[in-house]
Image (spheres, helix red, strand yellow):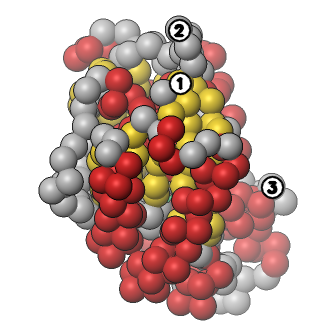
Amino acid sequence: MRVLGIETTCDETAVAVVADRLGGDGGDILSNEVLSQIAQHAAYGGVVPEIAARAHIDVLDRLISRALGHAKIEAKDLDAVAAAAGPGLVGGVLVGLTAGKALALALGKPFVAVNHLEAHALTARLTEALNFPFLALLVSGGHTQLVAVKGVGDYRRLGSTVDDAAGEAFDKVAKMLGLAYPGGPQIEKLALQGEPHRFDFPRPMLGREGADFSLSGLKTAVRLEILKLGTPSEKDVKDLAASFQAAIVDVIVDRVRAGVRLFIERHGAPQGLVIGGGVAANGAIRRALTQFCVESGLRFVSPPANLCSDNGAIIAWAGLERLKCGLTNDLAFAPRPRWPL
Ligand code: KG4
Ligand code: ZN
């Protein structure tokens, strides 16, 4: 089966075609076209919804043609069309969702509305053979959640952030340090040259019951330290980045540990820990979780960084998984800017 997926929930316009494997697990990415709008938003220090929606309109039809061309298939040979229907910026979602429905209607093929977070959670099954149930850590610019993935369409939230999302914390701290948007990758790069123990930043929620996250206190602690320093030197900025990253890594590992405990209590032993979302591209977080999983005897499934950040292949794959379960949608499906898993 071959499914085309469209992603327009934030600042990436992305279209991909994926196929499942005959009798096997996992899938093949036949094409994966991603156009980032970062340059158009950079001057504003974040994503501007109206600019995002218009930019998606400008490029989406060309990107669909390109994805089909690179996959070397004709639209009529698709088995379904999937589009991310939320959560995200409503203008952008409307663009991708409408294009997906129109394409499905014109081809007479099923349409699948995909939850963007569900797509991050299911990506591990595109790249590796992995059975349900598993624990998914979803860490992106807008979301931070631990979810028990029991099956396609069967998700139980174990914990989420009570304030900032992990990517939001990276981006806000980066802004304070005078770094360009999106700040996560820049903090990771600077942290490599910094001293992670120079600033003793708080690790909120460490050891706390449940599996919720809180990150705004950490962000405030960085702000206060910057104020104390006055004008931070280049070395200060590197040390602040390294110390902030060390703190957030500790928080994430602790919350995942708590999430594993909750998972076992409620759903039995997980088949593995899966990560997804833009922040899951972070090398320090990946290394720490790898070590945690080794110590806990848990399988760690970390899709490659380009599949952790937003792209069309994850939407196409989630669409394919839903299609196989008969979970298709009618054309009245409305955008869901807020759509918790
Ligand atoms: O999943 P994603 O591409 O878009 C959303 O759905 O939000 O995530 C984007 C977020 C941004 O906050 C960005 O700063 C963060 O992921 N990010 C990173 C890294 N790469 C992207 N954060 C930390 N380290 C990275 N290497
Ligand atoms: Zn995302």
Which residue was labeled with disc 3? 192
Q: Disc 2 marks which amino acid?
A: Gly
Secondary-structure class at tag 2: loop
Quick check: marks 3 and 1 in contact, CB under 8 Å? no
Is 240 positioned to the left or the right of 247 in the image?
A: right
Q: Are marks 2 and 1 in contact (CB under 8 Å)?
A: no
Q: Amino acid at mark 1?
A: Asp
Disc nearest the viewer among 2 and 3: 2
Pointer 1: what residue? 20
Disc 2 from disc 1: Cα separation: 9 Å
Viewer-proximal residue, 284 or 302?
A: 302
Question: Which residue lies at the image location 61% right of the left edge and 76% below the top edge?
Answer: 38
Residue 70 visible to an observer of this rendering: yes
**Whole-percent x, y for residue 46 in the image:** 51, 80
Please tell me which residue lies in front, 196 or 248: 248
Name the N-terminal-most of marks 2 and 3.
2
Q: Return the disc, 3 or 1, that comes first in the chain's sequence.
A: 1
Q: Is mark 3 within 8 Å of ligand 1?
A: no
Q: Which residue is mark 2?
A: 23
Q: Is residue 220 left or right of residue 281?
A: left
Residue drawn at point x = 60 percent, y = 50 percent? 68
Q: CA distance from mark 3 to mark 1?
A: 39 Å
**In this picture, residue 185 sits left or right of residue 331:** right
- Residue 120 screen position, x and y as percent: 46, 42
Q: Residue at x 38, y 63 (%)?
A: 99
**Residue most extreme to the left:** 332
